[in-house]
Amino acid sequence: MSFIFPSLLRGFIALSFIALLLTTTRADGGQIQGKVKDESGKTLEGVIVKANRAVTRSLDNQDTNQKEYETKTNDKGEFVLSGLLPGNYALTFELTGYRSFVTRRFELAAGETFKVPKAIELSREPEAHSLIRGAVLDATGYSLENVSVSVERTDGKKFKKIEKASVTGGQFAFRVPAETGTYRVIASADGYVTATQDVSVDRNEIRSIVIQLEKKK
């Protein structure tokens, strides 16, 4: 009996040590590290980074082990996702004002640290806008090219005046914020009386106008 007890004790200690190692491995898990920047190369802070682990199927065909991990990039554009189970992952990157980006899937082994080979680059979302477009004509209805055309806001909201020249067919177009607003379009050319036209624009609307210039007497 005295010989059996030490053997049992040694076995218990060995099993406890193995269990401790397994617990530590699960706690530490795998890691995914990387960096995020914009199209100009500037690092992006506050990007939401999600690691989506692929679903596996159990014998009774039920989904199991599906898990999503989430973090944010720091002021250097860097991120670390820790404590990940082994499996097949895809990364999703989200930041207001930028297009979301999803990587291809890759395998992460137990306890592995996977470093994304190069910085993830996010591109900006195209800004929503309304459009004021039209043409400049003379009194007889002929189109006028190279007329100076500008647009300014008249409802008191901040807006930087835009100026450009009419092109073929007397055409011009201005992008303005995608919100309700009132604007004044001004057309002027040598030998002609300056003409203006006020335009009201709703959200995401396209307004078409025609401005006629009278020759100076």
Image (spheres, rainbow, N blue to C red):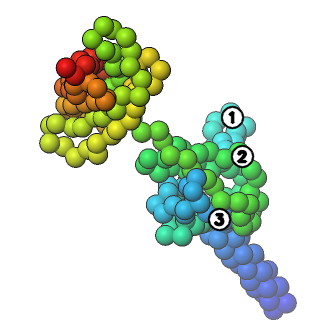
At 22% across and 32% down in the image, what residue appears? 183
> Measured along the vertical axis of the image, is residue 94 above or below residue 6?
above
Q: CA distance from mark 3 to mark 1?
A: 35 Å
- At label 1, counting other C-alpha atoms closer than 10 Å, the crowd grade (few under 14, some 14-19, many 20 or more) is few
Picture quadrant of residue 77: bottom right
In the picture of the structure, the residue carrying the numbered disc 2 is 105
- At label 3, counting other C-alpha atoms closer than 10 Å, the crowd grade (few under 14, some 14-19, many 20 or more) is some
Badge 3 or badge 1: first in the primary sequence: 3
Position of residue 159 in the picture relative to residue 51 (left or right): left
SS class of the residue under badge 2?
A: loop
Quadrant that contains the N terminus: bottom right
> Measured along the vertical axis of the image, is residue 18 above or below residue 96?
below
The amino acid type, in three-letter code, at marker 3 is Gln
Picture quadrant of residue 187: top left
The amino acid type, in three-letter code, at marker 1 is Asp
Position of residue 64 in the picture relative to residue 172 (left or right): right
Q: Which residue occupies the foreground of this view, 77 or 169?
A: 169
Picture quadrant of residue 119: bottom right
Position of residue 188 in the picture relative to residue 29 (left or right): left
In the picture of the structure, the residue carrying the numbered disc 3 is 33
- Image spot of residue 139 (x, y percent): 27, 11
Q: Which residue occupies the foreground of this view, 209 or 4?
A: 209
- Image spot of residue 75 (x, y percent): 49, 70
The amino acid type, in three-letter code, at marker 2 is Arg
Q: CA distance from mark 3 to mark 2?
A: 15 Å
In the picture of the structure, the residue carrying the numbered disc 1 is 60
Q: Residue furthest bottom?
A: 2
